[in-house]
Image (cartoon, rainbow, N blue to C red):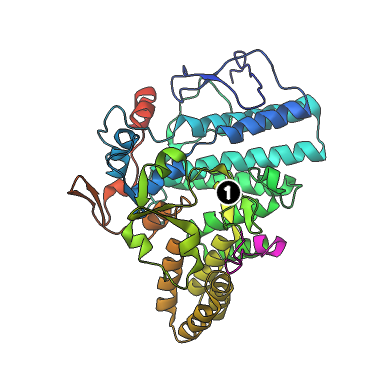
């Protein structure tokens, strides 16, 4: 393993990179090697800071947004909106690739160097646990963007290169889907042994905690259709804090606000300004709400002339990775798949009580009492669309579902993503392919 040329600059707000590495295009430069607990915490903070804003771009691929053809950022976003990954305009914003591996690089340096430099303490255990989870989360997000959905039929298909150690001369060949998940789950398991912090305070909600670990693990198992494990992990996170924002209270924060009672982790920038100021809410999303009785409608969206825009966009306070609203929906979906109908109804009822008017909640409870399992599963799917709107999960839900037909319009011309379209798996960015011939 070559580390002779490995030097790290630690800055309070991040780190600088020179793009030179042959395969991952990462070459850290600098003069300061971390040697104290504070240094390694700062290095991890840089890993968090460099985590990419990919979910805002994923929102454009879904049925949630309409791209404003006259916006300043339209030229950079139109090919993303049109699923044109094969031959995009040169000015198109590239999907993140290097930034994922930058965060992984920071995590790997901590995991390989910290114990030897400063020994083992409660704080270093916490830092290592977070580094393991950051590495796992980066690989998990890469997998969901650039590879097929996990299944027994797909598990041996090509996925993404794995970076589980530092080797500047390593060839980064794509691992399989199964191998990637094996690393993700192993890192989560190792982190669970080290985790010291049950729940992060609001000022540190960008960091992992025990509560975030369970929420992350629950989502991993959900995407793998491991229903009992998904239900158990969601329940473990809710056992720490099961609160929901009651939107019937006029002054209540948005559920995705990092200071809300249900916020778990707020790392992902899901509504960056260059997307939120360049798009409107799609009519199909607006029409999915009971606009008179669903309190989410007036809280999630704001009128802008004849259109609606997102109230979750353009502000870091709405960064969101995990929150309790999603966990109740995971409990509901997993319970239905396990034929535990009442648990699913109870989870949905808890969510509805905090999102609908009192009269609408009572009516919905009566409707659910007469729904069969298939109808309840459709309700969960619809509720994920409504509850988690514009939080960066819709693309993944479409991909792991029936991959429906989506129509986007540009200057009056329809562009279509057909049902089961191959473009539900995003192509590796061209820059990544150019730097790493092993991706082909």
Q: Nearer the viewer, residue 24 or 51?
A: 51
Residue 151 in percent (x, y) is at 41, 56
Q: Residue furthest front?
A: 305
Visible residue check, residue 402? no
Determine the image quadrant of residue 3.
top right
Percent of width and height locating residue 149 = 40, 52
Q: Residue at x 43, y 34 (%)?
A: 96
Image quadrant where one finds the C terminus: top left
Label 1 secondary element: helix
Q: Which residue is mark 1?
A: 185
Q: Is residue 240 magenta?
A: yes
**Is residue 416 rendered to the left or right of residue 272?**
left
Q: Position of residue 235 (x, y in %)?
A: 64, 65
Give me the residue at 18% from left, 48% from top. Answer: 412
Q: Is residue 183 above or below residue 310?
A: above
Within the magenta stretch, is there residue 258?
no
Q: Main SS type for the magenta part?
A: loop
Q: Which residues, given as a range, are shown in magenta? A: 237-252
């Amino acid at each position: 393993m070559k580390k002779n040329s490995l030097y790290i600059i630690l800055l309070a707000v991040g780190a600088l990179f020179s793009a030179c590495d042959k395969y991952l295009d990462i070459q850290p430069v600098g003069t300061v090697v971390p040697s104290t607990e504070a240094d390694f915490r700062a290095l991890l903070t840089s890993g968090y800071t460099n985590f990419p804003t990919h979910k805002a771009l994923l929102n454009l691929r879904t049925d949630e947004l309409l791209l404003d053809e006259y916006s300043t950022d339209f030229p950079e976003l139109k090919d993303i909106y049109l699923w044109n990954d094969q031959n995009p305009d040169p000015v198109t914003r590239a999907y993140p690739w290097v930034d994922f591996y930058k965060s992984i690089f920071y995590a790997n340096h901590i995991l390989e160097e910290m114990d030897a430099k400063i020994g083992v303490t409660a704080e270093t255990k916490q830092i290592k646990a977070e580094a393991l989870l950051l590495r796992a989360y980066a690989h998990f997000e890469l997998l969901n963007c650039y590879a097929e959905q996990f299944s027994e039929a797909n598990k041996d298909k090509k996925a993404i290169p794995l970076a589980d150690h530092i080797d500047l001369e390593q060839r980064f060949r794509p691992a399989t889907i199964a191998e990637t998940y094996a690393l993700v789950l192993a890192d989560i398991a190792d982190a669970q042994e080290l985790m010291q912090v049950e729940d992060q305070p609001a000022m540190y909600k960008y960091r992992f905690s025990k509560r975030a670990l369970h929420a992350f693990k629950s989502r991993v198992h959900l995407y793998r259709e491991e229903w009992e494990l998904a239900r158990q992990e969601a329940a473990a996170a809710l056992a720490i804090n099961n609160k929901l924002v009651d939107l019937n209270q006029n002054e209540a924060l948005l559920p995705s606000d990092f200071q809300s009672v249900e916020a778990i982790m707020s790392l992902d920038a899901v509504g960056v300004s260059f997307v939120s100021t360049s798009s409107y809410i799609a009519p199909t999303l607006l029409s999915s709400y009971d606009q008179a009785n669903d309190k989410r409608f007036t809280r999630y969206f704001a009128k802008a002339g004849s259109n609606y825009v997102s109230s979750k966009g353009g502000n870091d306070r709405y960064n969101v990775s995990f929150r309790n609203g999603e966990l109740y929906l995971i409990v509901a979906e997993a319970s239905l798949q396990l034929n535990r109908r009442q648990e699913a109804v109870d989870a949905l009822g808890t969510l509805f009580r905090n999102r609908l008017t009192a009269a609408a909640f009572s009516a919905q409870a009566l409707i659910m009492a007469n729904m069969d399992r298939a109808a309840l599963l459709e309700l969960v799917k619809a509720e994920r669309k409504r509850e988690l709107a514009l939080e960066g999960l819709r693309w993944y839900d479409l991909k792991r579902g029936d991959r429906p037909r989506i129509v986007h319009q540009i200057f009056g011309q329809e562009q279509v993503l057909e049902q089961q379209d191959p473009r539900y798996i995003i192509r590796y960015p061209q820059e990544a392919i150019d730097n790493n011939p092993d991706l082909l």
